[in-house]
Amino acid sequence: GAYLSAIEQANPSINAYVAVTAQKALEQAAKSDDALAKGEGGSLEGIPLGIKDLFGTEGVHTQACSHVLDGFKPRYESTVTANLWADGAVMLGKLNMDEFAMGSSNETSYYGPVTNPWRGNDNNKALVPGGSSGGSAAAVAAHLCAAATATDTGGSIRQPAAFTGTVGIKPTYGRCSRWGVVAFASSLDQAGPIARDVRDAAIMLKSMASTDPRDTTSVDLPVPDYEAAIGQSIKGMRIGIPDEYRMEGMPQEIETLWQKGIAWMKDAGAEIVPISLPHTKYALPAYYIVAPAEASSNLARYDGVRYGLRKPGDDIVDMYENTRAAGFGPEVKRRVMIGTYVLSAGYYDAYYLRAQKVRTLIKRDFETVFDQGVDAILTPATPSAAFGIADQDMAADPVKMYLNDIFTVTVNMAGLPGISVPAGLDDNGLPLGLQLIGKPFEEETLFRLSHVIE
Ligand code: GLN
């Protein structure tokens, strides 16, 4: 009840929710009250959550914040959200995001931008919350839900978490089922939580993670008690510091933050090891070939026949064209065109195949470092703090926007777990995050180390 009235009050200015499911929330909450009265509650009994609009929720608005899915209410529930409800969580509504999760600022949403609840000291300019999970991060930061689901294809959990002073973890590829989640780039997409602290993120991930016969890339491994890892000593653990992440032109405050993180790790007894990830500089260009290629294929299904929007035409091809022209925003169209181009005969070998080879090299870089006994890698989460809504530089040059993902995409390319933890404020009083990258399926290590930072 308190969360619903907070949403009513604050959402018109923040725009984090695109649909509020008050009725469902009250029903679920009543059930939770009964369960708790009988002493039977699940791990999330009665906890009110916001759900990114990318997750299929039965009978509830699910549009990936795209016009093309107008009015779509699936007849199924995604595995991740079903897991949360089974543990007693309560759904407050669906959260704003970049259209089909393509973006780093939440400005490509059909429902308009989300405003970051944080403001800089120097002025009153409205800032982006990051993206694509901008609604999730803003809702958590503004206390419009206790925690939220999010997804991360190239940084979309970690970058918005960093921009809003929240904790976001992208687990290992395969840890959570992708079933029922609208697909962007299937070989990179992973679900994960955004939460107010490391402990909440651990409890959320424990519930969200599962193996699922309906997603054959989900792994059949036990899901550890992540919460139990928090507070365990990190003495003697080896933390890698990749030389290649010291990017040219990186703001001094990011470097300072990184040094602070290194000092905290040392103070807690960890050993700092300089490492090299030599293929880092190719990660961003390779990502922007692989992700659009997969997206162009995944988005072929939105043709006006099966879901949502339909714009009539003279014949069926005309109808497809009219629907897609009206239904997709400019960023989605750009990705579909890039993807179609790099997959087309004659260009496939030069772009797509080459990018896949680069991806293998990036993966090997990490394997080599982990084989040398490194337990986790510490880097900044983003190259800057949150920027302004409708930033002129970014609008003029999409590549500037893509550079936001410079520290996060390698992790998706290699399928590894990565967490962003709030680590302090910049000179302007805005939150900054540090990222920890772990070995496959060792999210526990990340929770253990993160607790030292927060
Ligand atoms: N910003 C990146 C992109 O636009 C990553 C998005 C994501 O992780 N979903 O592709």
Image (cartoon, rainbow, N blue to C red):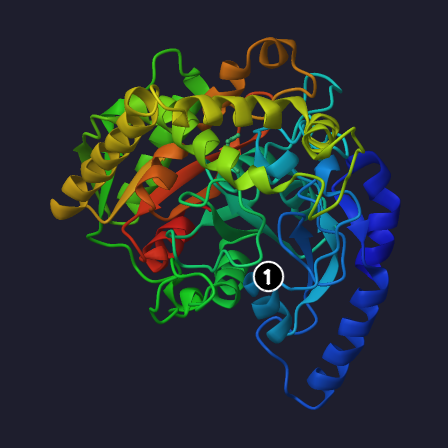
Judged left or right of residue 157, residue 244 is left
Q: Secondary structure at mark 1?
A: loop
Q: Quadrant of residue 234?
A: bottom left
Q: Quadrant of residue 427 in the image? A: top right
Point out the residue furthest to the left here.
372
Residue 256 appears in the rendering: no
Residue highlighted by disc 1: 78
Looking at the rendered structure, the kind of residue marked 1 is: Ser
Answer yes or no: disc 1 within 8 Å of ligand 1: no
Relative to 241, does residue 446 appear above or below in the rendering?
Answer: below
**440 relative to 286, above or below:** below
Q: Is residue 143 left or right of residue 197?
A: right
Give percent across and percent down for residue 318: 72, 28
**Residue displayed at 22% across by 30% down:** 277
- Quarter of the figure with the N terminus: bottom right
The reply, left or right, for residue 324 in relation to residue 245 is right
**Image spot of residue 324 (x, y percent):** 68, 30
Corner quadrant of residue 329: top right
Query: Is residue 269 among what the camera can see?
Result: yes
Residue drawn at x 38%, y 51% as measured from the top left? 173
Q: Residue furthest bottom?
A: 38
Count of numbered circles on the image: 1
State the residue in front, 418 or 60.
60
Query: Residue 452, position in %: x, y?
Result: 39, 49
Q: Is residue 86 left or right of residue 110?
A: left
- What x and y, as percent, mark residue 199? 50, 59
> Furthest residue to the front?
315
Q: Which residue sits at x=45%, y=21%?
A: 341
How many residues crowd mark 1 within 10 Å: few (<14), some (14–19), many (20+)? some
